[in-house]
Image (cartoon, grey):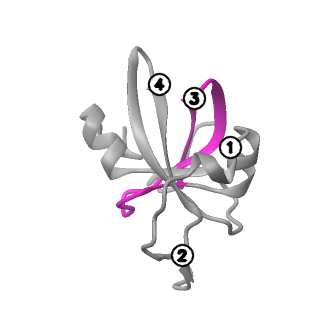
């Protein structure tokens, strides 16, 4: 069937985070932090004591502020590369399990492009 051009849908991928293949990870070109949402937080078996403090509020896509629960450093494996990433943990609904972007991509030397 193919794709309709120009292709500008959200870039959603599967990543190996920790020891799990995590589906529905959104790659966001405008985000400056990596974010984990409640489903993934619980699915990875994380507990509040696993988090380090993170007190800077984040802005949701709808413009509302979210106070993070904390931060956790987790490995992401992409092919043979394993990169440790600081994820901000938030307790709010989002249709994806996580957001990754600039810090992670910069470390890998990657570029998110729906054209490629």
Residue annotated with mark 1 = 46
Label 1, label 4: how many angstroms apart (C-alpha)? 19 Å
| Apparent side of residue 87 relative to residue 33 in the rendered image (left or right) | right
On residue 77, which mark appears? 4
Label 3, label 2: how many angstroms apart (C-alpha)? 25 Å
Q: Quadrant of the C terminus?
A: top left
Most prominent secondary structure in the magenta stretch?
strand
Label 1, label 3: how many angstroms apart (C-alpha)? 11 Å
- Residue furthest out toward the front: 49
From this view, report whether residue 53 is shown above or below residue 5: below
**Label 2 vs 1, first from the N-terminus:** 1
From this view, report whether residue 10 is shown above or below residue 113: below
Question: Where does the magenta region start and end?
Answer: 10-35
Label 4, label 3: how many angstroms apart (C-alpha)? 8 Å
| Front: mark 2 or 1 | 1
**Label 2 vs 4, first from the N-terminus:** 2
Task: Evaluate if marks 2 and 4 touch, with contact meaning CB atoms under 8 Å apart.
Answer: no
Q: Secondary structure at mark 4?
A: strand
Residue annotated with mark 3 = 18
Rendered location of residue 40, percent (x, y)? 69, 46
Label 2, label 4: how many angstroms apart (C-alpha)? 27 Å
């Amino acid at each position: 069937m193919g794709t309709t051009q120009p292709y500008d849908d959200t870039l959603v991928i599967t990543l190996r985070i920790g020891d799990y293949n995590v589906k529905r990870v959104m790659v966001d070109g405008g985000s400056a932090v990596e974010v984990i949402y409640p489903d993934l937080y619980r699915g990875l078996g994380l507990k509040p004591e696993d988090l380090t403090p993170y007190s800077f509020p984040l802005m949701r896509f709808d413009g509302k502020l979210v106070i993070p629960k904390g931060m956790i450093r987790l490995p992401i494996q992409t092919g043979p590369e394993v990169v440790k990433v600081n994820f901000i943990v938030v307790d709010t609904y989002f249709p994806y399990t996580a957001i990754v972007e600039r810090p992670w991509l910069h470390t890998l030397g990657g570029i998110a492009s729906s054209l490629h």
